[in-house]
Amino acid sequence: MMKHAKIKMQMQRIQSQSVQLDSATGINAQNFSKTENMSHTTTQTTNINAQNSSKTENMSHTTTQTTDIIAQNSKTPLNFRNGDTTKHHAKSRPPFDIFLSIITYGAAGLTILALISIIGYIIIMGIPNLKPSLFSLTYTNDNVSIIPALITTIEMTLLSLVIAVPLGIFTAIYLTEYAKRGNKLVGLVRVTAETLSGIPSIVYGLFGMLFFVTTLGLGFSLIAGACTLSIMILPLIMRTTEEALISVPDSYREGSFGLGAGRLRTVFKIVLPAAIPGILSGIILAVGRIVGETAALIYTAGTATDIPMSVTDSARTLSIHMYVLSNEGIHTGEAYATALILLVMVIGINALAAFAAKKLTKI
Amino acid sequence: MNYEIKKMKTNMKNNLKENIMHAIFLIAALTSIIAVILICVFLFANGFPAIGKIGIFKFLLGKDWSPTDIPAVYGIAPMVLGSLYVTAGAILFGVPIGIITALFMARYCPNRLYKIIKPAFDLLAGIPSIVYGFFGLMVLVPITQNLFGGTGKSIFTASILLGIMILPTIISISEAAIRAVPESYYEGALGLGASHNHAAYSIVLPAARSGIFASVALGIGRAIGETMAVVMIAGNQARMPAGVFKGVRTLTANIVIEMGYAADLHREALIATGVVLFVFILLINLSFSLMKRRIVR
């Protein structure tokens, strides 16, 4: 109990010191304004006590043993004191401090404003323009129906995924499960994947046009577009799968090996199933990129308006359709509606990915 | 006896399967390397001859782009400058707001608000560039037209829109960097009498600088490579930039606009434009990964 009393004394000394400092230099005003700031973040007033005690802890350099006692102590006498000084000294905050607060909240406010204005504008202008003619099965120059573009988008997505998903997952399996430590190839694959993920989509479009369309002779077609897109989304799928595989505990693998399973069986029956939510969220993110992609597709898939009957037909996805509409500038209303549908699709896809990722963290 | 042979057979079968799948995984892992090689080879093989024919200095520094003239002139200096100006503008608007917002997210934001705005900012990253471009065309262009005159399609408009587009990249990477700063830095600053603002801005923020620089590098990469949104709102005049409120054409826009009808040397010159863009991006990515390596250390 001796120790207890000693600490109590020490604390009182610090408090009286801090009050003196307050009136003398104003430095402590900042200290208390900190408490004030922090109290914004908490909803329960009792939490101020705990914060206050942690501040005192900093100042007095007490050991962990003593902090418990301080926490107990602070329950009663500090509350009154703290509330009092905060009020009193809030006025004497230096102007620069206030300026920093303003620009912080201002910047965050601007970002939120930009987000709300973009989404709000598209929704408000899009909903009145949703007409039944927009959803007719065939495209004409009058109704500029989005249904063929929508079907093309789905086909394009599936085709790209069929190519990219196995490649991405197998690469990730090789990197995490097969490659030995210090394998030079692993570093090389990571560097190239990083390079691929930084290349802008127009460069992919150029490459797709030169390689798939011209050199391989596929012409403007669904398959040329899908091949281009699959290279584009490969690093995304690879990285998310790799992360998901790494997060599977090693005990799963050890348990499987211990029961006599081979490496292949362990990978496919144990590790991959456990990593599915993470892989799925990566795939869904990739779908989001495909749906929103324009620049890589204009010169690989072309801009034909009909529903493609085979993979060698040219066709436009919803994004390209949107680009053509807004470029022509004739069907502005339809462009708004198309933008709304595109936005809703992408938001839905991203929400799905977030949901899948959340499931992953639960495991 | 019979049983043992059977066992050996299954073992061999399993081994064969293992080896085949191992090879398949290895081949899959090689695809990304092959893809990068293919992209480099095809772009360079199609772009370099044109640069050679036009002359490298004439191509890079030529101030005139008139592919329809006789004889045609191919100088991409206007587009290089256009890309640089627009990117610089985007950084001017996007980087300060992005970094401060990241600091807000990591150090100021109440938990309840964070749960709403974190996914909302992720959403900002997911919006297709064509929708951004449409928004810029319908909202930002008329506003700049009314405020500053001209057509409204200008470096200024493109900078603002690109600034918004690179926000999510900068916010998410900077936030992660700021969160990685040890809590003791912040607590120590408070213990020495610094205010919350002071501790956040002059202790935590500088400690996260390498991560923040990396986010800026990535943002620059996005801004230079952005195509569709810029095509719709930058004006696309292929002449030397004449002012902040005048139209400009970027490297990316040059490719998209003219590739549709280009032929022969014109087409090759456009591919060469792509090569220049590609080299820019490679340099930026290189600096990004160097910075990232420094963070890991």
Image: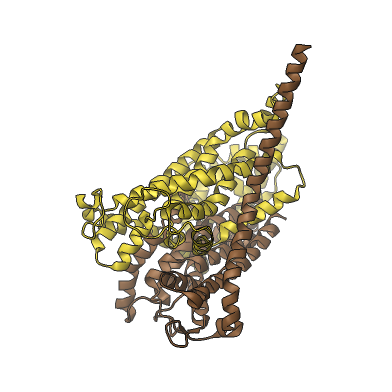
Chain colours: A yellow, B brown
Q: List the single residue furthest toward the front.
A: A217
A117 lies above or below B21? below
Q: Position of residue A201 (x, y in %)?
A: 50, 61
User: Which residue shows up at 61% across the image and 46% down it?
Assistant: A54
A281 horizontally vs B132: left or right: right
Look at the image and tell me in which quarter the C terminus of chain A lies: top right
Q: List the single residue furthest toward the right.
A: B1
Q: List the single residue furthest toward the bottom.
A: B71
Query: Could you say which is closer to the camera, residue B247 or residue B68?
Result: B68
User: Which residue shows up at 34% across the image and 80% down it?
Assistant: B148
Query: Could you say which is closer to the camera, residue A109 or residue A71?
Result: A109
Q: Quadrant of residue A221?
A: bottom left
A49 lies above or below A225? above
Query: Could you say which is closer to the camera, residue A110 or residue A36?
Result: A110
B285 horizontally vs A116: left or right: right
Q: Quadrant of residue A314?
A: bottom left
B285 lies above or below A138? below
Look at the image and tell me in which quarter the N terminus of chain A lies: top right
Query: Could you say which is closer to the camera, residue B147 or residue B101?
Result: B147
User: Which residue shows up at 74% across the image and 18% down it?
Assistant: B7
B220 horizontally vs A65: left or right: left
Q: Is any atom of residue A92 visible in this view?
A: no
Q: Is any atom of residue B277 visible in this view?
A: yes
Q: Position of residue B186 (x, y in %)?
A: 62, 55
Q: Position of residue A357 (x, y in %)?
A: 51, 40
Q: Position of residue A211 (x, y in %)?
A: 54, 60
Counting labels gives 0
